[in-house]
Image (cartoon, rainbow, N blue to C red):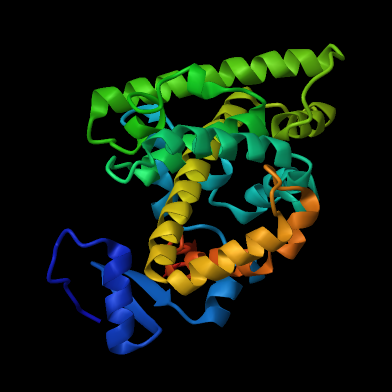
Amino acid sequence: MNKRSGNDHEPFATMIAKWTEEVGELFVLFFIYDPLVASSNPADVKRIASGERIDKASSFIKPITTLFGKRFAGQSLLAIPNYETWKPKRKLYDPSFKRSSLKDRLSMFNECANTLLERLRPLADGKTEVSMKEAFHEMALDAISKVAFSSDFNKTWDSKSLGLKALFHPHETKMYREAVDAMRTIGRDCIEKRIKAVTSGEEVPNDILTQILHTTIADKSVDLESLVDDFIAFYVAGQETIANTLSFAIVLIHQHPEVLYRLLSEIEDVIGDRKEVIGDDLDKLKYTEQVVQEVLRMYPPVDSINKESPKGGLRLS
């Protein structure tokens, strides 16, 4: 297939979507002599994503390991291409993301949501414009800080001028490098203090970092810089995906008043006048979960999965 987009600056995922409409759900692209097999068939996607032991495409991984001479994603889960290396590390994180584990931390999520509402109430005058994506970014940063590291990094850096905003503007090289340095320093300091506390038998928070350290210390597999890599990946991937999903959700809900009505009715029935969500509520908010799933289907935070053919010579997307 030899196609060019009418807009040279059009996102690659948008071009793929257009070509899928034109020629079907399976086709091959050639980048000079480098073939890429693109498929939007659900069975293919499931197989490539999780059904087989297929390595990630190194050409898509290399750009995020180091940027502008700064170690970025390094050896984090995001940046490990080899399946056999990635799988054991992924298992290390699995317990922290089980539904039961996240239910135990609902109080932290409630606290972050209430903080967001407190910030927005004075602005709800019908006249003040508010960037909800920016608000969701800060809430996500707050939630990740508390749930994963029992910290409040919003007080450590200004997320609007340093932190993650700079990471999403890599063309501003100086600001980007300073942001990466700052985040790695903060992450390293947080992890080193927790390692010291865990090894000396001190009482520590039961958060994601502690769960990971208990395993790595017991296995004598602590790699500080690798843990800092995951610290960076947590914030970049976690904050952006949460903020984008919530932003698209409010846009779509605004476009469909009937969905808003059903959401409010379900929330009223399940939560009522309570100020916080409890664990049992999650299993009852079925329509709410369906809405979130539909938002993710329509506007997925990750628009493609890029792997390398086990037989070599092909990239799969």
Residue 241, image x, y percentages: 48, 50
Residue sticking out furthest to the right: 201
Residue sticking out furthest to the bottom: 23
Residue 73 in sight from this viewpoint: no
Residue at (47%, 23%) from the top-left corner? 183
Residue 244, image x, y percentages: 43, 52
Indicate left or right for 190 with 203 as reference. Answer: left
The N terminus: image quadrant: bottom left
Residue at (34%, 71%) from the top-left corner? 35
Indicate left or right for 208 with 188 as reference. Answer: right
159 or 8: nearer the eye? Answer: 159
Indicate left or right for 11 with 146 as reference. Answer: left
Residue at (67%, 35%) from the top-left corner? 108
Indicate left or right for 230 with 30 as reference. Answer: right
108 or 273: nearer the eye? Answer: 273
Residue 155, image x, y percentages: 50, 18
Residue at (68%, 13%) from the top-left corner? 193
147 or 65: nearer the eye? Answer: 147
Residue 130 in sight from this viewpoint: yes
Quadrant of the rendered structure where residue 163 is? Answer: top left
Q: Is residue 135 above or below residue 54?
A: above
Residue 164, image x, y percentages: 40, 32
The C terminus: image quadrant: bottom left
Q: Is residue 261 above or below residue 26?
A: above
Q: Is residue 296 above or below residue 119?
A: below
Number of labels in the image equals 0
